[in-house]
Image (cartoon, rainbow, N blue to C red):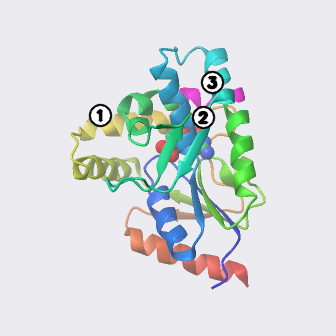
């Protein structure tokens, strides 16, 4: 089957972007690139090094120097891929609530975005890729062949994130997750540079009442129609 070459999937936190993109990428033999892991890795490294995330210069320097790699999963522990920061396996560390709390601040810095966007663009232009994020269709790859914007209510997204944490054997507090997502949505969509929003030519899908499989088949249908 012939699918569009470069696909952008944007949307708010926990809207199911990565789960859906992962299934599509496996089915189509495409590369999945979840750009959020880059902002998370920089944030985690800054915290690990004891930097204040308010120190824009120090955090920007870090983003310019760190080598972030995404590789096939090396362990069978529920991960979809390995995330390496300067060779260190940080796959689960970057999902820590401490990172959730600070990542929107870090990702609003101009130089951080510049450094990471350049790398993302290079990977995206290789083609046969599904790139996931907040600004892929608007800034990173405005020439993408297909743009999808996945949305869902904040309550539904909090519920999904809650279930995910419990399933992974961790503890979770629904109200805290809801509060954290609401704050992150606000910061991500009101920041000055590359805010979260649907590109004008994106297809918007609200996933509140859809299963993962339904979202996947809807995107497949759009992708095939788009090819004609
Ligand atoms: O998709 P995620 O929750 O893993 O993303 C983490 C944060 O990274 C998100 O709150 C905003 C930022 N981000 C961004 O600014 N631009 C992207 N393309 C991807 C993520």
Disc 1 + disc 2, Cβ < 8 Å: no
Could you say where residue 84 lies in the image, as x and y percent from the top left?
51, 41
Residue at coordinates 70% horizontally, 53% vertically from top-left?
Answer: 123
| Of the image marks 1 and 2, the number of the one nearer the N terminus | 1
Numbered label attached to residue 62: 3
For mark 1, what is the residue? 176
Image quadrant assignment for residue 200 = bottom right
Query: Where the C terminus falls, by quadrant?
Result: bottom right
> What residue is shown at x 40% (from left), y 39% (from top)?
95
Gap in Å between the C-alphas at discs 1 and 2? 21 Å
Query: In the image, 87: left or right of 131?
Result: left
What's the CA distance linking mark 1 and mark 3?
A: 29 Å
> At numbered mark 2, what does the secondary structure look like: helix, strand or loop?
helix
Please tell me in which quadrant of the rendered image residue 208 appears.
bottom left
Relative to 8, residue 35 above or below: above
Q: Nearer the viewer, mark 2 or mark 3?
A: 3
Give the magenta-colored segment's residue range.
104-111
Disc 2 to disc 3, how far (Cα)? Answer: 24 Å
Would you say residue 90 sits in the magenta stretch? no
Question: Closer to the observer: label 1 or label 2?
Answer: 1
Name, please, the residue furthest toward the right: 143
Taking the magenta stretch, the answer to whether it contains residue 106 is yes
Q: Quadrant of the N terminus?
A: bottom right
User: Which residue carries the number 2 mark?
Assistant: 190
How many callouts does the rendering have? 3
Q: Residues within 10 Å of mark 3 (few under 14, many from 20)?
A: some
């Amino acid at each position: 089957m012939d699918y569009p070459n470069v696909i952008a999937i944007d949307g708010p936190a926990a809207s199911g972007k990565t789960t859906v993109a992962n299934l599509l990428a496996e089915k189509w033999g495409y590369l999945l690139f979840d750009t959020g892991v880059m902002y998370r890795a920089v944030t985690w490294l800054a915290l690990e090094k004891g930097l204040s995330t308010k120190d824009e210069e120090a955090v920007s320097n870090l983003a310019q120097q760190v080598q972030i790699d995404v590789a096939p999963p090396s362990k069978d522990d529920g991960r979809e891929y390995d995330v390496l920061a300067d060779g260190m396996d940080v796959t689960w560390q970057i999902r820590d609530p401490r990172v959730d709390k600070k990542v929107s601040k870090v990702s609003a810095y101009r130089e951080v975005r510049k450094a990471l966007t350049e790398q993302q663009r290079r990977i995206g232009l290789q083609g046969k890729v599904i790139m996931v994020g907040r600004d892929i269709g608007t800034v990173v790859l405005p020439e993408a062949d297909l743009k999808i914007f996945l949305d869902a209510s904040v309550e539904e997204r909090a519920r999904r994130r809650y279930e995910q944490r419990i399933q992974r054997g961790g503890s979770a507090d629904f109200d805290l997750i809801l509060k954290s997502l609401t704050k992150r949505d606000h910061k991500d969509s009101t920041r000055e540079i590359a805010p979260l929003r649907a590109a004008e030519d994106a297809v918007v899908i609200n996933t509140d009442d859809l299963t993962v499989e339904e979202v996947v088949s809807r995107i497949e249908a759009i992708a095939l129609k788009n090819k004609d």
